[in-house]
Amino acid sequence: MPYRTLIEPLALLAAMARQERLVLLDCGFDLGDTAAGERAYQAGHLPAAQYAHLDRDLSGVKTGRNGRHPLPERAAFAARAGAWGVAPGVQVVAYDGQGGPYAARAWWLLRWLGHDAVAVLDGGLAAFVAAGGHAERESAPATAEPPYPAQAPAMPCIDAASLLAQLDTTTVLDARPAERFRGDVEPLDAVAGHIPGAHNRFFKDNLLPDGRFKPAQVLRHEFAAYAATLPTLVHSCGSGVTACHNLLAMEHAGLAGTRLYAGSWSEWCSDPARPVARG
């Protein structure tokens, strides 16, 4: 049975022991030091894992008006996925050491591409080692596949113009820390604040103190206030990355069907004609 949201370390270890075909993606990243994730990967990663860089592999070309981490072109990402060895039916497991936001971005992108069997490793490398696995430093070459075959996107998204036109009937859930959401501080973008009418749910609120996701029933209870708004719920954050964490948490809780605003605040605030709220 494919894993579609989260996979526990013991389940991954069992799949490895059965020698199942897997594609493992280390997505560790640091917005303040964009080489840190790759250094950590080189110091130790899941056996046979490949490194997926947020800027190079999980984002598209920036124009200055489309946000800090715009979506890649579908054809380019299909080629990237194929180079990793992703093919229909192959289980992909993504992970990072930051609680899952960058792995969730890879998860969302592969689902958007139409790939079903992709999950985030709950707890990342640390949980895998704690469960009896081991890390290695060697990098094994991928068994490359052709570009992933074109399929209908399995994840809906919305662009800035459509969101602006639908603000009165859309619920926006912002995954940034509360102080950035309010506009008290803004370390990354030129303008502080949030999309008018948005609600705040810091992505780390999806996690237990040990960095693993809260149980599905707990997440379902915590997101219950949004259950009635699923068709109109849009996830946002600073640049469309940590928003995927909230989206993943809701999917894991059985609350599927929400949309991603991939440009998020970094795109929204690049146009002074778009409204801004603070507080």
Image (cartoon, grey):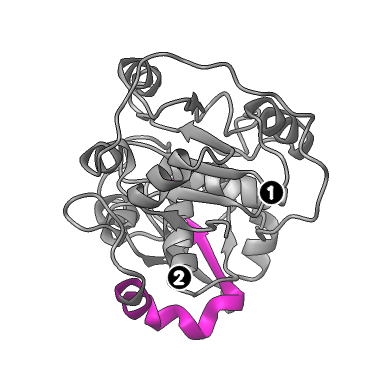
Relative depth, front residue between 194 and 92? 92
Q: Secondary structure at mark 1?
A: loop
- Residue at 65% from the left image edge and 58% from the top image edge: 155
As drawn, 166 above or below 193: below
- x and y, in percent, of residue 187 in the image: 31, 36
Q: Which residues are magenta?
A: 218-240
- Residue at 63% from the left image edge and 63% from the top image edge: 163
Dominant secondary structure of the magenta stretch? helix
Q: Residues within 10 Å of mark 1 (few under 14, many from 20)?
A: few
- Residue marked by disc 2: 197
**From this viewpoint, which residue is outermost toward the bottom?**
228
Relative depth, front residue between 69 and 95? 95
As drawn, 32 above or below 263: above
Q: Is residue 249 left or right of residue 240?
A: left
> Going from the N terminus, do you reach mark 2 or mark 1 first?
1
- x and y, in percent, of residue 225 in the image: 39, 82
Instruction: Identify residue type, mark 1.
Output: Gly
Query: What label does residue 89 carry, if any?
Result: 1
**From this viewpoint, which residue is outermost toward the front?**
18
- Examine the image and state in which quarter residue 257 appears: bottom right
Relative depth, front residue between 50 and 47? 47
